[in-house]
Amino acid sequence: MADLILAAPEIFLICAISVVLLTDVFLPGDQKNITYSLALLSLVGTAAMTAYFSVDETVIGFSGSFVADPAGSVLKIFAYLMVAICFLYSRDYLERAGLLRGEFFVLGLFGLLGIMVIISGHNLLTLYLGLELLSLSLYTLVAFNRDSGICAESAMKYFVLGAIASGTLLYGISFLYGVTGTIELQALGEHFRESDVLSLPLILGLTFVIVGVAFKFGAVPFHMWLPDVYQGAPTPVTLYVGSAPKIAAFALAWRVLADGLAGLHENWADMVVVLAVLSLGIGNIVAIAQSNLKRMLAYSTISHVGFILMGFAVGTEDGLRASMFYTLTYVIMAAGAFGMIILLSRRGFEAENLEDFKGLNARSPWFAFVMLMVMFSMAGVPPLVGFYAKVVVLESLLAVNMFWLAGSAVFFTVIGAFYYLRVVWYMYFADPLNEESLEATTDLRVALSINGLVLLALGVFPGPLLDLCVQVLS
């Protein structure tokens, strides 16, 4: 019973998914809003279970394969919030596009279940199973619009490359098991703290695991899937792929690198530094050449991944907290950016090009200001939270005398500010392509407004969220 209580949120969610799936089967095509409501209720119930059965210290169950801890609970709550925002932003779009089907919400919940398994995974096999559950849901979501050849092409690219990455990760896990005789993270950590002897199988296993983690993050040079998927998938799916799974990627890196392989930090830190610098450089430079906003945001994501990985490269608790803080704030920024694309889209028209934001200030001054806050936050302009998130990562780098890495981060951030400011220029200084008013439901308008204001509030008062990261990771 103790183990079942630890996994109560996961058990509740899988039961809720079954109810949503069976209910949707018998609903007429014009009543899919019921499925949407049930999906949101499932998220509320799962959040309540997580809060009620939360723990104050690390508790391990299911024979060492499952872990419950305060940091995991916080990550899960944020994942629920991001999936709920995705559903909320997407409903109106899907209805206008004739894509309001129950499969979208069911697959979204299955993906969330995979995220939860990754967050609570305490051995390499559990982490792999959670990763595959999430990945299979994402592959299907990308191909959600079955009438679109672009979606099918993007899903196929994602599936093939994702399968290669999953095989690489599993191959690395097999090497680690062969060397240590265990796949439990705690036993791996103890083994590598006691023995610093490197062998060829261990180096190969470590390399393959890093490659698998880097692919799930979308770090350079394993980023080739990300721009195509962001551009080819329906915008609600892009919103989903660009937000909640980033929390799972952080949890995967945290469990594997900071817990299981902490004793080998000196060996994998250099690899992570290379990934971080390449991601910052390629992401920011290539984003300048993009005219498609979704593709630009894909390269922007790659650059932000560079900052997250820098926190892991530091190898201290401060670095890990900075990475967690950056991840949580980034997913809020990403939700706002893709939410604005959904807001400007209408039946038969996708507002995914930079020109589509021309003159937005003339059409809607308030939502132009919301998009300005999102872009400025991503660029790291004070007093928005993106600035403080970058400062926290840079402080952790300077604390361990990694001055050159901090300098390169600042350099590429200045370069990246150009393409964010270009969006702002289009909104405020270019003539609008049309004078049509924005078509959106009240709940979407309210949620997007709150999203933008949260970025400002967290920038002015970052203390509570940062203290929460410090508290749960201590």
Image (cartoon, rainbow, N blue to C red):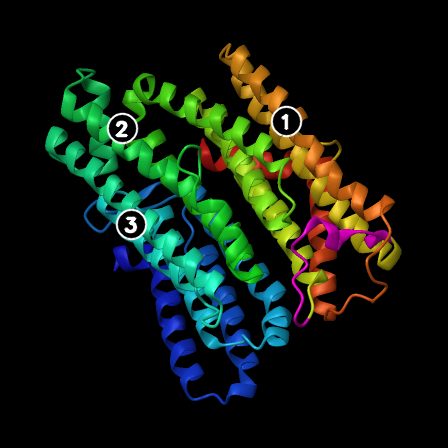
| Circle 2 residue | 207
Label 2 vs label 3: CA separation? 17 Å
**Residue at x 65%, y 62% (from the top left corner):** 350
Q: Does the magenta stretch include residue 121?
A: no
Left or right side of 244 for 444:
right
Main SS, magenta residues:
loop
Any part of residue 385 in sight: no
| Circle 1 residue | 413
- Mark sitting earlier along the chain (2/3): 3
Mark 1 touching mark 2, by CB under 8 A? no
Q: Which mark is residue 283?
A: none
Q: Is residue 366 or residue 417 the one in the foreground?
A: 417
The amino acid type of the residue labelled 3 equals Ala
Which structural element holds mark 2?
A: helix
Q: How many marks?
A: 3
**Residue at x 28%, y 21% (from the top left corner):** 264
The amino acid type of the residue labelled 2 equals Thr
- Mark sitting earlier along the chain (1/2): 2
Q: Where is residue 166 in the image (x, y as percent from the top left)?
A: 28, 46
**Quadrant in the rendering for residue 389:** top right
Which structural element holds mark 3?
A: helix
The amino acid type of the residue labelled 1 equals Thr
Where are the magenta residues, as a range?
A: 347-361
Left or right side of 83 for 138:
left
**Quadrant in the rendering for residue 432:** bottom right
Q: Does the magenta stretch include residue 359?
A: yes
Vertical comparison of 140 with 170: above or below? below
Q: Where is residue 330 in the image (x, y as percent from the top left)?
A: 58, 41
Label 3 vs label 1: CA separation? 32 Å
| Circle 3 residue | 163
Q: Is residue 427 or residue 458 the one in the foreground?
A: 427
